[in-house]
Image (cartoon, rainbow, N blue to C red):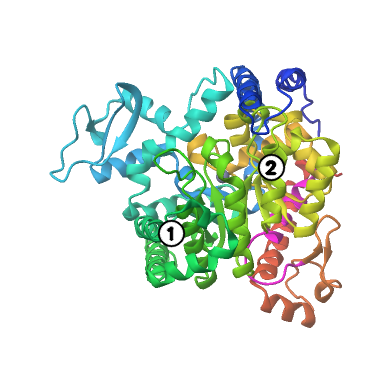
Amino acid sequence: MKLFTKGARPLAALLAATLLTAAPSFAGDTHATASATVSAAKICAQPNYAVREYAAVIEKTKKEQPELAEALRLFPKGADLHNHLSGTVQPEKYLALGAADGACYGPQGTTTPYTIEAATSSGRCGDGFRALSEASAGDRERILQSLSMYRFGYPDTQSGHDHFFNTFARFRAVSDNACNTPAMLAEVLRQSQRDGVSYLETMLSFQSSAVSALARQLKQQFPVQASYRDSRQFPALQRFLLQAGLGDTVAAARTEIAQYVNKTRTLLNCGSPDTDAACGVDYAFIVTVNRTSSLADGTPDLAKVFTQAAFSMLLASSEERVVGVNLLSKEDAPVSLAGFQDQMRIFGYFHEAFPKVNMALHAGELTPCFVGADNPALKEHLTGTLKAGARRIGHGVSFAFLKDKEKSEVADLFRHNNALVEVMFTSNAQILGIAGSAHPFAQYRAYGVPVAFASDDEGVSHANFTDEWIYGVQKYGLTRDDLQYLGRNSLQYSFMTGAPLWADVAQGKAVEACSADVPGSATPSVRCASFLKQSAKAAAQWDYEARLKEYWQKYGRFFGKR
Ligand SMILES: [Zn+2]
């Protein structure tokens, strides 16, 4: 098959040129900080060429090679390991859910973009707000644009980043309503099924108000910030939270989860004659800690980070549907940058306290555009996160901006943790203005760091998971072997329980117990069958191999061999 060949890379050239002239240091003194910020602002003010080129690749493929696009949609993708439930639901669905809730829409501030808010207790809309169910076609269009990247113009890199992160608050009135969670989950499972995903790990938070109340109590009891910076004091903080009712909050979250799971099954008619195909998608939750929590003066609210981490770890260790913990939100926000070392100390502490709880942390969703060239955060967010014990890194884009020696150091830490990078082309192009040769995807592979594709926020991106794969094939010339490796990796590095099937994914080498078997066969050897019986993960991987085999028979002609 003739693969799309890449043309000139204007953004890469611009970045390279700007890197040479950017401030040499961002190490904390006011002068360096100011000049780095000026340089960063300068790069961020440039048009986001990357996202335009990215979108053009997807559009061109769908238009000129619809059979290939369809073959990629059907490709068994294994797991989608990195997605945020609220950001994954499409804005059209939020409009429908909001209208059913009687929610209202109105201008944010004095003008568009629009935001959604709940109706008052008497069912009326607030001043300047109108019922979502009565929105005109024009207003619906503007609401969709306000809630997602749909038709966003990307006049510069910074504005795409800001618009992306701002959307979440605009649909929060619908997405934070726990009554809508099962409908959101059902929708996301349908989307996953349509895109050939068989297992989903989706991020969300539970019992947010109760956890915030515990954080306030903790702050009252330990008002000095230094308490949250000294790991010797962490056991006392943890004991206080347990005495204050942390266990009850975890129990309430478990009840909440059971309700979500049951209601989602009902919505999808699982187990009935008219069962939705989405019932075949297995899923689990990853509970989240917010890195941008701040005090009134804008400094990091470490008590809140500590409380959310304590809650998340305890929940993940006691609830089988919660398979891991993540740290999220705008990584380049001043409060995230200022609090990073303290956050890692907290995560490192809890990793030791709960060694079996999996951590997949966002790290390296940074470029010089946002933090200045030579900012140590470009490397330290990767190394710090891996040293804290992360088994998966979300994004890892800053890798592309490191020197070779630093890249080797980061790659060694990945090897040490047996960790993987979750690669998300769409949101990287939209938020960071990074794609193609400026993206570290190929570099990670060259350094032997395991990678898998994930979707991040399909709803906000107004895209779908298949787009990531189309881009991978067209831009990087991924072959059949590459696609298979990526799909296999997603399950291998998932947080499903049990030992993995592969001793070496890249080499396609199964573990000893199944080494003499054909992966996916209907009649595994006795030894292999007994291994598969003991591991949910390996069993899912075995099923995946069977699907893969069937897929290659039908669609293998679309893809080149390595
Ligand atoms: Zn994310």
> Is residue 354 in sight in this rendering?
no
| Mark 1 touches mark 2? (CB < 8 Å) | no
Residue name at image x 51 percent, y 59 percent:
309
- Up-down relation of residue 224 to residue 401 (above or below): below
Residue 222, label in figure? 1
Give left or right: position of 439 versus 164.
Answer: right
Give the quadrant of ligand 1. top right
Front in this rendered view, residue 78 or 525: 78
Earlier sequence position, callout 1 versus callout 2: 1
Give coordinates of residue 113: x percent, y percent.
37, 25
> Is residue 4 in sight in this rendering?
yes
Residue 13: image quadrant is top right
Residue 487, label in figure? none
Q: Which residue matches tag 2?
A: 396
Q: What is the quadrant of the N terminus in the image?
A: top right
Give coordinates of residue 184: x percent, y percent.
41, 50
Classify mark 2: residues with Cα within 10 Å, few (<14), some (14-19) or many (20+): many
The residue stretch that appears in magenta: 479-501
Amino acid type, residue under disc 2 in the picture: Gly
Residue name at image x 73 percent, y 32 percent:
474
Give left or right: position of 119 versus 211.
Answer: left
Residue 377: image quadrant is top right
Query: SS for tag 1?
Result: loop
Residues at marks 1 and 2, CA–CA distance in whole angstroms: 35 Å
- Up-down relation of residue 142 to residue 428 (above or below): above
Amino acid type, residue under disc 1 in the picture: Phe
